Every structure is written in structure tokens, then in C-alpha cells.
Image (cartoon, rainbow, N blue to C red):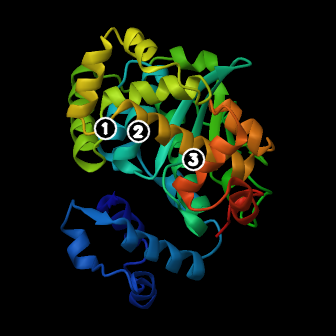
Amino acid sequence: MKIPATYLKLYLEHFSAQPELLGTLLDGTGLDMDVLASSDRYVAFESVAQLLENANRTLEDGWHVRLAAEMEIMQHGPVGIAAATAADLGAAVVTLARYVEVRAPFAWLERGEHDGRAHLRCFETVELGPLRASLLETTVVACANVIRHVGGQRDEGLTLHLPGPPPAYAAAFSAEGFAESKFGAASYGLSFPAVWLSRPSLLYDGTMHAASVNKCRELLATTTRRSDLEFSIREMLHESGGRSPGLEVVAERLNLSPRTLIRRLKEDGTAYRDIVEGVHKTLAREALMNGTESVAQIGYRLGYSDASNFGRAFRRWFGTSPGHYREQRGDGASRP
């Protein structure tokens, strides 16, 4: 897994006048500021993780919230441009959800609407450990910043949802202009009035949007080996709470024959069963870390006939039982 070097360059530029601090942040990362400054390459996640660990240990609490809130739409590359130039806020949110992995390959975004509000939930797709809060909070704040700029709405009605109790840096969220932050949530995410979805984008440009989406699609395939087809299936599974309706039903909804769907997924380097398992793994991890459902309830919701079947699948994914995983990683997110 790799992360765009752009984010590192923007972040490290803040400390370019403090060589000693810059050296501390880069210690053990194998990165060089001069090389990063002249490159648009992707950086190995291991190097990024080491830099984040250095930063969490060295800098003031909440540094990542301030950094994410300060970023301009253009600094999110083709994903930011595609979202900003979409016809309306609804199309911008679809773009963010579909292509977030181009910029944050450790996360999935799930769209939804209920109680008159639009929701965007953020899930980790790989084990992030102690960096979970820093990376997912950064992703949510960055998405919230794009949404309020695309729709011309600064803060009223936009709410951040964050697991666990308020951290020591909770004030950083309101300091950056977010009107409300709700802690103790079931997952990382944000919400806003659903009527905003039809709000025209201030920067709408159909030609630029199409070009940027094409670039996002290309990068998604080359950096994560995922496709728009996989995203569409994954979104259906998320809408059903993770329970699979079956390949035949999914194919029908996509206006494809089952044979064609199987073939196209194979061409993309995946299979329907792999996509279902990926969604189950992600939702199970989130439910155990932040939810209150029993292990049996989680398994049943995901479509497992009994708790033992779910337990066996979970051990295959994570090398431990669901109960032990909850004990080790539950009760909210790890904070830097």
C-alpha cells in the first residue's frame, strides 16, 4: 500500500524552517525532503506510518486535524478536482466515496441517508493500529472540508461523528470551523442535511469533471487494483448491512448476466466472493471495535448462519476470535 507524496510534502513544508524538527519527523522513514519536493510519486505506507508515529510523539495533540482542515481542494489531486467540478453536492459525495482510495488507500467511504440527513461513514480496510484515529480523523475532516466548500456551506448543519470519548484535542475540531462533533459514534464519519445534496456546485465544470474522473479511475486501477464495478457491488453490500443478496441478484441489478459479471470481475483481478469477504471483514472489525452488538448478532447481520461459522471466518481473517479481538481493540479508537 502506498500514499501520495503530495500530502507528505505539504505537511513537511510547515517545518522546513526548523531543520532539527524536520529531521526528527523524518527519522527512520527512509525519506528525504529534497527527493520528495521534486517528486509526485507514491510513498510506501511503512514510511508514512513511521512519520506519523514520529509526529504523534513530537507535535502538539491534534496536529493532524489542523493539517486536514487547512488543505485546499486542489491539494487532493484528481479526487478533489473531480468532486469540486461535479454538477452538485450529491455528485461530489458520490465521487469522494468512489475514489477516496486513490488518496487514502486504507479507507472506504459508505454513503447513506436517514432521518433527513446524508451520511458518509469511513471504515479502515487494513489494520491501522495506533494510527487509526490520526488517519481516519484526517480523512473525515478532509472530506468534510471538501463538502462545505463545494456546496458553499461553511459549517452550520455539518456534523463530524467520531468513536470513543472526546480526546485531549477535541477543541481542535471546533477551532477549525466545524460546528458540531459527536463523540461515542459507531464509526468515523460525517453527516449534513440531505437537502444539501441537490445544491449546485460553485465550481461545476463538466469537461474537467469527466477528465478528472477518468484519471481517478486510472489511478484506482493501478494503485489499488480496484474498479468501478467492484465499488458498485461493494456499495450494494453496504446498503444491505453486509448481507449478500447473491451473485445472480447483483448481476441483475447491474444489468449483467451472472456469466458476464464473473468474467468482468476476473478481468479486474477479483471475484464476487472476494468482494463479499472484504466487506464482511471491514464491517465486522468496525462493529467489534465500536459497536454494542454481540458477536452472534454481528455474524447474523452479515449473513452467517450461526456464531461458530462467523467465528471461523473471523479467525481466518485476523488470526484470533471475535471476542478476543474486541477485548484487545474495542471501546473506541486509539488516540495519538
Q: Which residue is mark 1?
A: 270
Q: Which residue is mark 3?
A: 313
| Earlier residue among tags 3 and 1 | 1
In this orientation, which residue lies closer to the viewer: 245 or 66?
A: 245
Q: Amino acid at mark 3?
A: Ala
Q: Which mark is residue 299?
A: none
Q: Amino acid at mark 1?
A: Thr
Q: Which residue is mark 2?
A: 274
Q: Quadrant of the C terminus?
A: bottom right
**How many residues crowd mark 1 within 10 Å: few (<14), some (14–19), many (20+)?**
some
Q: Secondary structure at mark 1?
A: loop
Residue 58 quadrant: bottom right
Q: Verify CB contact (< 8 Å) between mark 2 and mark 1.
A: yes
Q: 111 left or right of 150?
A: right
C-alpha gap between disc 3 and disc 1 = 19 Å
Residue 182 quadrant: top right
Q: Is residue 178 visible?
A: no
The picture places residue 34, in percent across and down from the top left corner, at 23, 78
Q: 131 left or right of 42?
A: right
Numbered marks: total: 3
The picture places residue 97, in percent across and down from the top left corner, at 45, 34
Q: Is residue 250 above or below residue 171?
A: above
